[in-house]
Amino acid sequence: MMKEIKDPLYAQVKNDIQNKILNGEIRVGDKLMSENEMIEYYHVGRVTIRSALSTLVSDGYIKKEHGRGSFCIAVPKKTKRLNIDVLVNLDDTYLLPFIVNGITSVLDRKDCNLLLHNAKNSPEETDRFLREASERGTNGIIFQHPLIEGNQPFSSPILKRLQNVGIPSVCICGRSLDSSVNLSINDRYGSYIAAMHLLENGHRNILGLFPVENYGVNERLEGVLNAIQMTHKAQFHLLKVEGIQNSEKQFLNALEKHDCTAVICYNDFYAVQIMHVLQTRGIRVPEEISIIGYDDSSLAGSALPPLTTVAHPKEQMGIDAANTLLNLQQSFESNAQNDTAYRPTLIVRETVRAI
């Protein structure tokens, strides 16, 4: 039979005194026994008593007054679990799982209650959940920038009211006029380096495949156009589509009409779909057409051939959002407004060839 392993003597003394405080036997303001009395009471040495008292001081249970002794000053309250509301588009299985995983990895470790809401990329739904959180009570809010025409900053008087009472908020994937902190991706730079990669590999007729409306469309287009304008004789042909499945013929006609050698896509989803369209028609990637995506999603690495794309710190954004919110919650400044735009990097794989 194994012997029972007991706590060190000083810890046993400390636990006994702590329990007496917690059960009310020693109350706030009461003077504890002197060191000599404790030595006799616990049958231990002075060093053990002093170690126990030092630990109680550090834990906030007692204070020591020179020449007077030790006094109970407080019964430390149990740490309150923070309620953090997270408003995102849960229908997005493309990028949001990475971001949410980053958020939950921090909040779980910090023992917070995470309340996850499906804001569905809608300003109205986001505003509704903000109002509910405000009325119910929350310790902080992380919310995804909803889809707004023209990608305008999101604004809500509810966020302002929350700030005024010291409840912080963090906007991810965009910018809000009223949040404490904004975390976004520098999409102009990301699409610029993607376009420059094609141009540096000799491509001068490039087709751009973008959705009619989505988050970051304008920013990503501007980055591509900036790169094109810097390169002599480069031509960019923009094709905006509602979806790939209904636009195959339109896409193939545009490739042939403009004699394009490369396609730059709004994201990896578009790029992988286009690769499939080309391959089913016997058009080889990258031997005949080069393709470049955006987001470095799980689709990019599993594509055949593996997709050259633009990466940004998706999960890190979630981690930073949660850590920032908790830091603000502890030392909040109502007038604090900080923006962080992550700089993407190019991931070169096998879908772009030099010509």
Image (cartoon, rainbow, N blue to C red):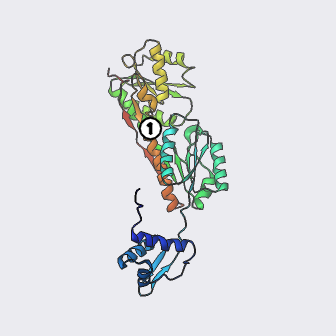
Tag 1's secondary structure?
Answer: helix
Out of 42 and 331, give the one closest to the viewer.
Answer: 42
Q: Residues within 10 Å of mark 1 (few under 14, many from 20)?
A: many
Kind of residue indicated by mark 1: Arg
Examine the rendering and report whether any part of residue 137 can be seen.
yes
Q: Residue at x 54, y 22 (%)?
A: 244
Where's the N terminus, which quadrant? bottom left
Out of 329 and 230, give the one closest to the viewer.
Answer: 329
- Residue under numbered circle 1: 188
Q: Position of residue 147 (x, y in %)?
A: 58, 39
Q: Is 151 left or right of 314, judged from the image as shown?
A: right
Q: Residue furthest front?
A: 1
Q: Residue at x 46, y 25 (%)?
A: 271
Examine the rendering and report whether any part of residue 338 can be seen.
no
Q: Residue at x 53, y 48 (%)?
A: 171
In the displayed structure, 75 sits above or below 209; it is below
Q: Residue at x 50, y 83 (%)?
A: 31
Q: Position of residue 78 (x, y in %)?
A: 54, 64
Q: Is 185 left or right of 169, judged from the image as shown?
A: left
Out of 290 and 254, give the one closest to the viewer.
Answer: 290
Q: Is 199 left or right of 147, judged from the image as shown?
A: left
Q: Position of residue 342 (x, y in %)?
A: 42, 44
Out of 177 and 80, give the one closest to the viewer.
Answer: 80
